[in-house]
Image (tube, rainbow, N blue to C red):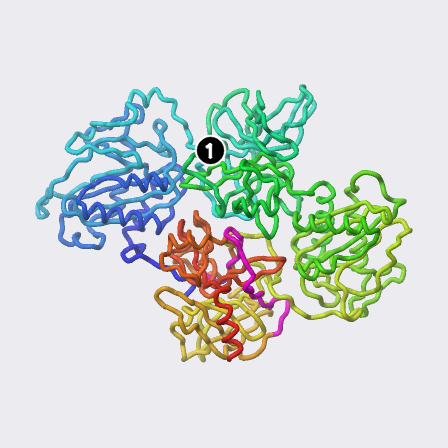
Amino acid sequence: MSSITIYVEGLAYDLFDRDCVTEHNKLRRLHGSQSLSWSESLAVDAQKWAEYLAINDKIEHDGDTLAEKDEGENIAWFVPPQPKCQGSLKPNCFTCSEVVQNWYDESGNYNYQMGIAKKPDLPIKHFAQVVWNASMEIGVGSAISKTYGFISVARYSPKGGEGGPQTFIKNVFPKGAIPILQERDSTSPSSTPKPTILGGTENAAFQNESSPFDTDEELTNQELEQKPMEDITCGIVKRRGPTGNEAIKPGEFPWQVGFRYQNRLGKSNVFCRGSLLDREWILTAAHCFVVRVNPKFKLKVLLGEFDAQNEDGREVVAEASKVIRHPLHRKNTKDYNIALVKLKTPLKEFNDYMRPICLPDQTVSFSGGEICTVTGSGLDYSLENAENTLRAIDVPILSPVECRTSVRWLTDRMLCSGYTERVLDTCKGDSGGPLACYNKGKFYLGGIVSHEVIGYDDFGKTCVVSHNGLRKIHGAQPVAWSEELAKEATEWCEKLAMRGELGNDNTTMDSKNRGENIAATSLTNSKSGGPRPELCAMAVDEWYSEIVNYNFETGLPKSPGLPIKHFAQIVWNSTFEIGAGTARSSAHGDIVCVRYSPRGAEGDPDTFKANVFPEMGAPPSNLTEEGIKSFGVQQSDQKGKYSGSITCGIGRRSRIVGGEQARPSELPWQVGFRYDGPYSRTNIFCGGTLIDKKWVVTAAHCFEQIRYDMTLKVILAEFDTKNEDGNEVIIPAEKVISHSRYNKRTKDNDITLVELSQEVEFSDNIKPICMPTSSTDFSTGTMCTVSGFGTIRSGGPQSRYLMKANVPLVDHQECKNSYRSLTENMICAGYRQGGIDSCQGDSGGPLVCPQNGKFFLTGVVSYGIGCARPGYPGVYTNVKKLLNWIETTKSSS
């Protein structure tokens, strides 16, 4: 029962369909094209069109749909010679491989320069290329027509670009007439048909009762010869799935370019990036070129580059001849932050590593909620690989209203992307680079990287590097820079400087689950100007020395010469973000404030991965000594003692996204259900979410059929279903209570509570999720996480390991356009382009969303059409809408 998959009747992936995919991929391999995968979405479209053709007894292309969705289409038809081929099912007397082979033969028989068939006995009708290099998915439909017999429709996505002589990996769309077939005598041996072939696009036109060589082409054959055909259509790549700050592969984003200056003595690093528009022009940010540079330095453009430290022969270094900044560009506001760079010599050709991106037209808009991809070399959290290899990350487009909460001076010429809960965005060196948005089979340039992350200068980088160096020693995950935390830390530092005192912002710390460290230098150690980059490193070393000197059992310093003040753990394993700020105080010199999120739970003895808050008494605020003075955050109730209390919604946070394996204890609220009997046991059949010591939330459809011959077991802290690591806890279920108004057909109120037979003990591996309140709200585009032991593709095997995927919340009305039976008790999450969905989790498993450093249970995996299908996000039970039922059921049990 891992993730419900709804199949439209008659669309099962049968032998005919499999034969189609196999034959296509066999021919594509001959030309080095990527393999196609089966798409239920395309199959639905193809089936609908085949039925339309059969009902209306005609042959033509679905021009409107092909144009709207950027799909290609092949059609074949023949009159079956045997009675067994009649009926609603696909015939076994004619294979799809024969149909595909005929389409391929037409391609091979086509003279690309003359626009006619090489062999008159094998006429060219209409065809869509069988080996379009851009295509990634295929779907097939069929129906029986009175005149045309068995009709087979194949749909391809994306369609790709047109033309180019004598190559099969480019697209050609010749136009001609469609011959009308007469019914043959099915008993005559000579009536064995060859399929009639039709391929085409949105602009296909047809003439009846005409020769196959009569054309009404938009371009004559002579024009085809004279027109300089573009080798590559913009925005077409071998598209990857959703990504979360991952290193990209060569050729994945071939429009990305870099700028550097160079003279005879040397060259600079890449200082800005841009997007290739055509053979001669590059679009970038105006602020990259506001500083005057010595004329002896030449502006160089790097194309096809993947690794700045290692050349692989694909790179092209071109010289720029002109930089044109927008005349209204303003340095202070970054308004009109756009510039064009012209190459001195136009590129001779495009290739897989150097291609243009599409510019949006009136049909493409970005209003908010779209998931786009930003690329650059400054995206690495650890900074060890910054400015070396290119990386990519998916970010949601924010609506102007959302953006203006952080950027008050937003203009109509700006858009925002990123996360409302954390900053996962571009860094220095990525300015001018592309924000690429996938739409209708192509990538469009949605935006230009304009503003860098606030405050992430050398001081901020040193803070991150210093923390991560110490965290690495103890196996703690690296922390990333947070603009929000940096803003909080700076504001608090400024308040302390004005007051002339030192202390913690305990109100904010408690309300937002933050950690905080504060350090100060004496006046005799201070220098004029901004903070020294090494200042944060010195403070971090001092904080760490306090931890090392602290006896976790006695609560006292190990060495009297190194006193313990207050401190927050440098290596809290739960922390994944930091932000730092500074201010100049007349009383204390330079003050450094560092904020951490989340703070995590209070700890265990003798471990740096847990949180300890000793109360040793604050030193006097009037500092006269030289050096760093350290203060920390949360005061414990009893000096020297640690607490085993657990805060909900905090796990080992990882930055891996996109349908990947989770880490142990990363999702400690995840549970699995299985049945155990005297002689056997089942696999995990559904997931669930621990909400307290006794209760688990899951989906009602998981228990439509309860097995009374076996015992229902709840598995906690499971990570690898094949191997036990000693952390697993298995508890029998006491009660299974499904919502009384659960509707099996519509999946409304798809929720169940499972009571454990005994209370569970919390630990690093077992923790509850936070439950939302009536005021908890997550906006469209919020990136949430779904997890479980489900399949990694529709119909595929169950995963051995706990898997997770990050998916954005989808607007309710937009989702209702895909699912008409959607109710207010449901929410949707997923990517418009597909690729990641709840089949990577289990039915009943959690959809959790971050807020203020914690995760909240937002949805329960319920159902969806297919797995990660474009246009059909996953559907989840809306937990917030059913809070009253949850609380009432628990209290009445």
Q: Where is residue 326 in the image (x, y as percent from the top left)?
A: 57, 27
Label 1 packing within 10 angstroms: few (<14), some (14-19), many (20+): some
Q: Is residue 772 magenta?
A: yes
Q: Is residue 789 magenta?
A: yes
Q: Position of residue 78 (x, y in %)?
A: 18, 44
Residue under numbered circle 1 = 359
- Above or below for 76 versus 711: above
Query: Residue drawn at (18%, 45%), measured in percent from left and top?
Result: 56
Per the rendered image, the range of residues in magenta is 761-790
Q: In which quadrant of the rendered image does the N terminus lie?
A: bottom left
Out of 458 and 410, give the one closest to the viewer.
410
Out of 596 and 227, give the one closest to the viewer.
596
Out of 756 and 488, give the one closest to the viewer.
488
Query: Residue drawn at (74%, 56%), measured in percent from left and top?
Result: 516
Q: What element carries label 1?
A: loop
Out of 124 and 346, give the one closest to the viewer.
346
Q: Where is residue 859 in the image (x, y as percent from the top left)?
A: 49, 62
Q: Would residue 719 be seen by someone viewing this image from the given angle?
A: no
- Above or below for 529 versus 671: above
Query: Residue drawn at (38%, 36%), measured in percent from left and top?
Result: 160
Q: Label 1 sits on what residue type?
A: Leu
Q: Would residue 437 be seen by someone viewing this image from the given angle?
A: yes
Question: What is the magenta segment's predominant secondary structure?
Answer: loop
- Above or below for 787 versus 710: above
Query: Residue drawn at (61%, 33%), measured in percent from left and top?
Result: 272
Kindly indicate the quadrant of the structure image that contains residue 675: bottom left
Q: Position of residue 789 (x, y in %)?
A: 48, 62
Specify whether 418 is left or right of 495: left
- Above or below for 766 versus 24: below
